[in-house]
Amino acid sequence: MKNSQASCDKKRRSFLKMSGILGMSALATSLLPVERSEALPFTSTEYKVTKTRLAMGTFVAITAIHSSRDEAENAIGLAFEEIDRLNNVLSRYKQSTAVSELNAEGVLKNPSLEIQEMIGRSLYFHRQTAGAFDITVGPLIDLYKESFAKAQQPGDAEIKEVLQRIGSQHLRFEGSGIAMARPGMSITLDGIGKGYVVDRASEVLVQNGVTNHLINAGGDIRASGNAAKGRPWTIAIQDPNKHKDYPDIITMTDGAIATSGNYEIFYDREKIFHHIVNSKTGHSPQFLTSASITAKTVMDADAMATAVFVMEPKDAMVFIENQSESECFLIGEDKKIAKSSGWQV
């Protein structure tokens, strides 16, 4: 029996290697150059063109299947231009962005359509998840960073003080602008912005005649059409231990998937404090190590993956079961796996 299992595992690893499978957050920054391109002919009428480069703090890989190598490369170039443009809109670390202006002034007059869409959808998921998804946790993330930069753990009193400045219910659309009702508030679009950008990049590709493509932005994935030779795209769920022992593999033609995990960004060795935080308790949730969500758009998958990671697993499952066209794959701290009823088998 053990020999049989070993044989299966060997075949599985071989399949992953031969198919060039795309794992969630599988692009290791230490192994890739800042930019990489390749174009491979599969048939006399079909090219697979891939370009990978650093964007939004991660490696973004765009793969296109098209009859013309030049047209595919041009469309990919335009998609990356859109990624760069939007990154200059939503980043809170660049002083010139709309998000930075809102955080500094507490009000943003005449926000762009992109900002309105992202914040509007964020407030929708805040209501849908009973506050589990909250873009106003910026002050809490900053506290974590500042404390651990000084080799200190944030204290309960500090967290309690910061919580007074958190809550999406205090973020409002007023007239033609967006305003924060409490001083010292700040937003971060990290839990939804990258997904929004990937969706827009996908739209650019389609507008330029490249309907068959896949975008992987550090685990936020958008699939459109087919992979080479008319096959569906193959996607592997990231192993939280980064051993490439993928816990599941799915196929997709049109749709999106996003994963949130405590292995992505954490501030202490024990991963008690990481980049996903509960806006009610001020602490990072410890129920899961990974939450993967499928949805129609990467923006929605991104937001729901963050929210589900914050929720207790039983509540998360109920939430996803009530979402049309969305499924989840959860890995608990105890390494147990839970799937929604419609998760791809």
Image (cartoon, rainbow, N blue to C red):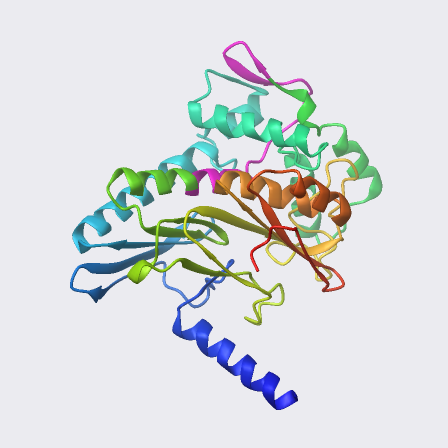
| Place of residue 57 in the rendered image (x, y in percent of width and height, measured from the top left) | 47, 49
Relative placement, left or right, of 319 versus 161 is left
Residue 205 lies in the magenta stretch:
no
Let me know if residue 36 appears in the view.
Answer: no
| Residue drawn at the location 55% of the way across and 36% of the way down | 189
| Place of residue 88 in the rendered image (x, y in percent of width and height, measured from the top left) | 41, 35
| Residue drawn at the location 77% of the way across and 35% of the way down | 280
Please tell me in which quadrant of the rendered image residue 159 appears.
Answer: top right
In this rendering, the answer to whether 256 lies above or below 123 is: below
Residue closest to the far top? 175
Residue closest to the far bottom? 3
Relative placement, left or right, of 242 versus 84 is right
In this rendering, the answer to whether 175 lies above or below 107 is: above
Q: Which residues are magenta?
A: 173-198
| Place of residue 66 in the rendered image (x, y in percent of width and height, measured from the top left) | 23, 53
In this rendering, the answer to whether 69 lies above or below 277 is: below
Q: Nearer the viewer, residue 91 or 41?
A: 41
Across the whole image, how many numbered discs are drawn on residues? 0
| Residue drawn at the location 40% of the way across and 53% of the way down | 54
Please tell me in which quadrant of the rendered image residue 157 appears.
Answer: top right
| Residue drawn at the location 69% of the way across and 41% of the way down | 143
Relative placement, left or right, of 82 versus 114 is left
Q: Nearer the viewer, residue 41 or 323?
A: 323
In this rendering, the answer to whether 29 lies above or below 56 is: below
Q: Quadrant of the N terminus?
A: bottom right
Q: Quadrant of the C terminus?
A: bottom right
| Place of residue 76 in the rendered image (x, y in percent of width and height, measured from the top left) | 28, 48
Let me know if residue 302 appears in the view.
Answer: yes
